Image (tube, rainbow, N blue to C red):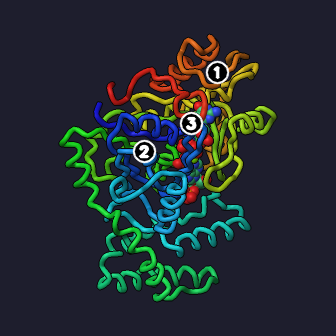
Amino acid sequence: MTNVVVVGSQWGDEGKGKIVDWLSERADIVVRFQGGHNAGHTLVIDGVSYKLSLLPSGVVRPGKLAVIGNGVVIDPHALIAEIDKLGKQGVTITPENLRVADNATLILSLHRELDGFREDAASNSGTKIGTTRRGIGPAYEDKVGRRAIRVMDLADLETLPAKVDRLLTHHNALRRGLGEPEISHDAIMLELSSVADKVLPFMDTVWVLLDKARRKGARILFEGAQGTLLDIDHGTYPFVTSSNTVAGQAAAGSGMGPGSLGYILGITKAYTTRVGEGPFPTELHDEIGQFLGERGHEFGTVTGRKRRCGWFDAALVRQSVAANGITGIALTKLDVLDGLDELKICVGYTLDGQQIDHLPASQAQQASAKPVYITLEGWKESTVGARSWADLPAQAIKYVRQVEELIGAPVALLSTSPERDDTILVTDPFED
Ligand code: GDP
Ligand code: IMO
Ligand code: MG
């Protein structure tokens, strides 16, 4: 297939960045279509680590075009800072290799502040989400509320003041309610004018660009952020992010029609992690959970928070396979399981004495669902850096086959270390 959509099939941090970087060798264009700088994608190339939050992971490869689509919420300060940071690592970003959708929504400092005010207030009442405090939720609220400032507004100084007034009427009412100081019109105008010159050179009509590229036969790689269980509709609501993270959003969030999306690749960690609050049926509070966290270096890229760890939950990933229309998966971090005596996989749940095969949508039921496990034998050999099936111990292959069978999707790629080239290719998503 010509195009590939990469999505997270769990709660984020599945290794999307590594896989997108690996696949981008085969692509012409790499497109982000939702989320913002709440994402943290780490790539390791010849021992050098690159941490990306807002920029598509394809940006580190020379000759590829990186695109930020309309579905992304863009903090212009974060964008400028990330371009500068990568520049210091030798990755030059110019309008030649980065385009930003003119109709994408901006995250302003007032969004970041509101996110923080709410999380602080919720900490006291026990209703905290554990957001990344980047202003993601408040910015999407303004987009849906039809009062957002968008990238193109930076170029239209005549109509901008009225838009800022509309936005401030809403935000200052919220801030008064929270007992926080109001913001002046001039402060927002100053903020916007301080970033306009740096952001506008990247602005483009992305749907036109993608349409032309598609007609010429370009290979387009869509890079999802977060994961399916963090999707605003399909995730563990309200402990989710504020965008649709599923593959269908690649179309709406870029302006390319769903018929052109192609292969849907679900990035799937060989165990489960989650950052922030919310239900997690297979979470381990014992020494095995600690082992996974330490061996897997499970600390958030964006906030540095410790990720919660647990067994692989096949019931959840089976749900993701359905919600995304996953064609195949990239199974990552198999190496982290090396050395464990036995491995458990969740195949369903019990709830009120009944067996169920998927996690219900109700928050209360999600919190009380108990996992049903099968147990597999572990392996003692190291799989770190394995680059072919032949390098994998028989028990590791058995584990992979069991995962495929339980989730109902085949493994297309298998990752055995953070390094770009420690990747086993089973089926090339661009050729399938
Ligand atoms: P993303 O948000 O989905 O892009 O994932 P993150 O980059 O936040 O987290 C995945 C972490 O695991 C990163 O530090 C990667 O370098 C690392 N990683 C990716 N694949 C593998 C793998 O197969 N084995 C190991 N040990 N680490 C990996
Ligand atoms: P990547 O792309 C893991 C989580 C936050 C919080 C919830 C809402 O690296 O996989 P938000 O700031 O989005 O309003 O926070 O979503 N979250 C992530 N967890 N990986 C991510 O991105 C995440 N982005 C947001 O921890 O629980
Ligand atoms: Mg991440």
Q: Earlier in the sequence, mark 1 or mark 2?
A: 2
Image position of 326 with respect to 377: above or below: below
Residue situated in front as seen by the camera: 236 or 262: 262
For the C terminus, the image quarter is top left
Residue at image location 50% in from the left, 51% down from the top: 90
Q: Are marks 1 and 2 in contact (CB under 8 Å)?
A: no
Position of 361 with respect to 369 (left or right) is left
Residue situated in front as seen by the camera: 188 or 279: 188
Q: The residue under label 2 is which amino acid type?
A: Gly
Residue at image location 61% in from the left, 54% down from the top: 302
Q: Secondary structure at mark 1?
A: loop
Q: CA distance from mark 3 to mark 2?
A: 16 Å
Beta carbon at label 1 within 8 Å of ligand 1: no
Point out residue 12 in the picture as x, y percentages from the top left corner.
56, 44
Point out residue 9 in the picture as x, y percentages from the top left corner.
51, 38
Q: Nearer the viewer, mark 3 or mark 2?
A: 3
Image position of 292 with respect to 409: above or below: below
Residue 205, quarter of the rendered image: bottom left
Point out residue 106 in the picture as x, y percentages from the top left corner.
43, 68
Q: Are marks 3 and 1 in contact (CB under 8 Å)?
A: no
Q: What numbered label is drawn on residue 383?
A: 1
Q: Which residue is mark 2?
A: 58
Q: CA distance from mark 1 to mark 2?
A: 27 Å
Q: Secondary structure at mark 2?
A: helix
Mark 1, other Cα within 10 Å: few <14 / some 14–19 / many ≥20: many
Q: Which residue is mark 3?
A: 46
Q: The residue under label 1 is which amino acid type?
A: Thr
Position of 427 with respect to 262 (left or right) is right
